[in-house]
Image (spheres, grey):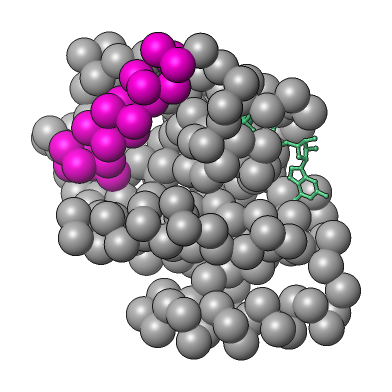
Amino acid sequence: MLSVPDVTDAAFFAEARELGALPAAGAPEIAIAGRSNVGKSTLLNRLASRRALARTSKTPGRTRGLVMFALRLARAPIPELRLVDLPGYGYAQVSKGERESWGPLIEGYTRRRASLALFVMLVDARRGLEDEERQLYEWLGTEQVPAQVVFTKVDKLSAHEKGLLKSKGRALFRGRTPILASGETGEGIPQLWAAIFEAAAAVAPASGATEQGT
Ligand SMILES: Nc1nc2c(ncn2[C@@H]2O[C@H](COP(=O)(O)OP(=O)(O)OP(=O)(O)O)[C@@H](O)[C@H]2O)c(=O)[nH]1
Ligand SMILES: [Mg+2]
């Protein structure tokens, strides 16, 4: 049975624009990645059950650094976790220097962060998977980073289009079936929570041992 936890507390925790600025690892982290404007911050707010925790915008490329939020949960298999809003990739309108610093930041974080439980890769349901996203997904596989593809903005699809996307997704990703979600309506959020809890269980210290966690 799928259910959504109560988020009893959600707060900004840290922002890092370079690897050295990352806070010490603690609670399991769920990174939310995807093209600029795909709806990362909107989905993060939906998970946090907060309207405006992460900044959302109609102007692409607003989230610059890696922004972390700390959540406390009730009615959940783990008491706390962190949501990480990653800068959008594939956004051409920022300076070249800034764009080039994003790759290494995301790559370094993704490869080295022991507390990273799940890399959630958002894909615009209307655009489908593009080359850059296929490459990223493959790379996550070679780095053995648990990843979950989420097709988002599905509120803009017809029932027929959703059906097609589902069967295509099942064929493409035999391991983890993509989740169809909408940050706008909340569709797919219980499924995403289930994936998050499953992944977090693999990195979280056993309950009661949080004080000794590294
Ligand atoms: N219809 C619909 N619109 C959405 C959804 N999610 C986000 N949007 C809209 O898409 C735009 C971008 O949303 P954001 O959440 O700011 O996107 P982002 O991926 O965080 O963007 P950057 O931080 O700039 O990379 C906003 O206008 C949102 O209202 C969704 O599920 N459905
Ligand atoms: Mg954003």
Q: Residue at x 70, y 84 (%)?
A: 164
Residue 142: say if magenta. Answer: no
Please provide the residue range marked out in magenta.
96-116
Give the x, y percent position of residue 156: 85, 60
Position of 164 compared to 202: left or right?
A: right
Give the x, y percent position of residue 96: 45, 16
The answer to whether one can see residue 172 in this image is yes
Q: Is residue 39 above or below residue 109?
A: below
Q: Is residue 4 above or below residue 161?
A: above
Position of 99 compared to 129: left or right?
A: left
Give the x, y percent position of residue 192: 55, 61
Give the x, y percent position of residue 131: 46, 58
Position of 19 compared to 97: left or right?
A: left
Residue 115: say if magenta. Answer: yes
Asked where in the image residue 128 lies, by quadrant, the reply is bottom right
Q: Is residue 92 above or below residue 149?
A: above
The answer to whether one can see residue 76 in this image is no
Which quarter of the rendered picture does the N terminus lie within?
Answer: bottom right
In terms of depth relative to the viewer, which is nearer, 69 or 167?
167
Asked where in the image residue 41 lies, by quadrant, the reply is top right
Position of 139 compared to 86: left or right?
A: left
Q: Residue at x 49, y 87 (%)?
A: 171
Q: Residue at x 60, y 35 (%)?
A: 36
Q: Residue at x 31, y 50 (%)?
A: 117
Asked where in the image residue 199 lies, by quadrant, the reply is bottom left
Q: Dominant secondary structure of the magenta stretch? A: helix
User: Where ligand 1 lies, by quadrant?
Assistant: top right
